[in-house]
Amino acid sequence: MNPLDRWRLVLGRYADRRLPGAAGGSSGYARMDRALDYLYGREYKGRGLRQELGPGSLDPSQLTLVTWLNEVRELFPQDTVEVIEKHALDRYGMTELVTDPRTLERLEPNQQLLRTLLTLRGHLKGEVLEVARRIVRKVVEELKRKLESEIRQTLTGRLNRFRHSPMAIAQNFDAAGTVRRNLKHYDAERGKLVIDQVRFFERNTRRLPWDIILCVDQSGSMADSVIHSAVMAGILAGLPAFRVKIVVFDTNVVDLTGHSHDPVEMLMRVQLGGGTDIAQAVRYCAQLVENPHRTVMVLITDFCEGASPGELVRAVKQLAEARVRLIGLASLDGQSDPVYDRQMAERLAACGMEIAALTPQRLAQWLVKVIS
């Protein structure tokens, strides 16, 4: 793309007089220009610019939302499409993208779309709700596939280098043991070692009867952490050594423990937004504690308490005094780059709660350290 065409696409329709013959009039970029103007032309309206009226023309038919989506996905690379869809939803409030089933089916399933669906959960009805559920399942399964192997390996044990296993698992391959075992099959004439028997290390399994309570803030700013918490709960619930309880809260508390094995069902019951009463949620979780010495409570929140800070400090202090292991996460997602109330977090740290921002893999490593 030459610089003139690039500038024409950046500047939009009002560049026609200054850049004649560039992208707007070139058959190669006219469709791109029209697709971008369908979205970013709203910027002019938002700034109070009056729509210009002109003579009739032989321009193509006006884009509709569905045809615009098709155009965008056909004309631009995938990473650009995701940025455009994000701007449409977040900057220009085009919520019809996720409230019309035909349109929703054309969107690329990704975490950004999942976050938007969770935000608008209360507005999804009928057919669009079923489409949304399929999207949620697809994104969650992809996220779980990326996380599950490493988290399970971290939590279920390290290699036992003194015993071998009949299970042929690639990560457990014992290269040196395999060579030693097959030295008698060395073919001197060909200078090659013939492998008759492959050795694999056995994996130690930790049988730790720990209860894991995930207490998750579902206020709007915590969307990514809510998603990762649901996936993490599903992975932990699949490990027999753990009992998982998951609670989400805003100014109300919802116990989703009955769905801890199913991240999709958990997320479909989340409603992002509203106020934040962390103390109430912590007090509820305290009622779920059966054996304090074998309980870990993970509080996932931005620590922006809407109720009495003193009540929250008191509730956390009581759990710490009961010897419940406590960690407060300002973020549980792939970035670990949170914005949170540092003063409140410091007060809770003084009560005995560890404070961090972690990826799911790092949380798994922390759990291993705590329960070892």
Image (spheres, rainbow, N blue to C red):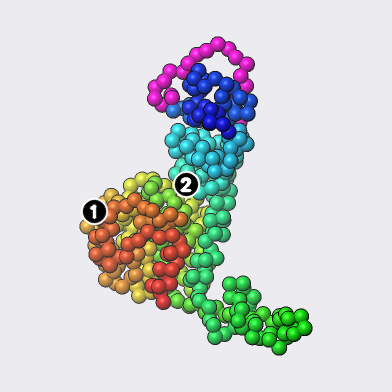
Q: Which residues are magenta?
A: 44-68
Which quadrant of the figure has residue 253? bottom left
In the image, residue 351 sits, relative to residue 53, either above or below, namely: below
Q: Is residue 199 left or right of residue 316?
A: right
Type of amino acid under label 1: Ser
Instruction: Assign the C terminus to one quadrant of the image.
Output: bottom left
Image mark for residue 324: none
Q: Earlier in the sequence, mark 2 or mark 1?
A: 2
Q: Residue at x 31, y 73 (%)?
A: 323
Rendered residue at 49%/35% (across/down): 88
Residue 290 shows up from this direction: no
Residue 298 magenta? no
User: In the image shown, does 82 or 276 lie closer to the viewer?
Assistant: 82
The residue under label 2 is which amino acid type?
Answer: Arg
Task: Name the residue tied to disc 1.
Answer: 308
Q: Position of residue 371 (x, y in %)?
A: 40, 74
**Which residue is depicted at the point 45% across and 67% down?**
364
Query: Disc number at residue 115?
Result: 2
- SS at circle 1: loop
State which quadrant residue 146 falls in: bottom right
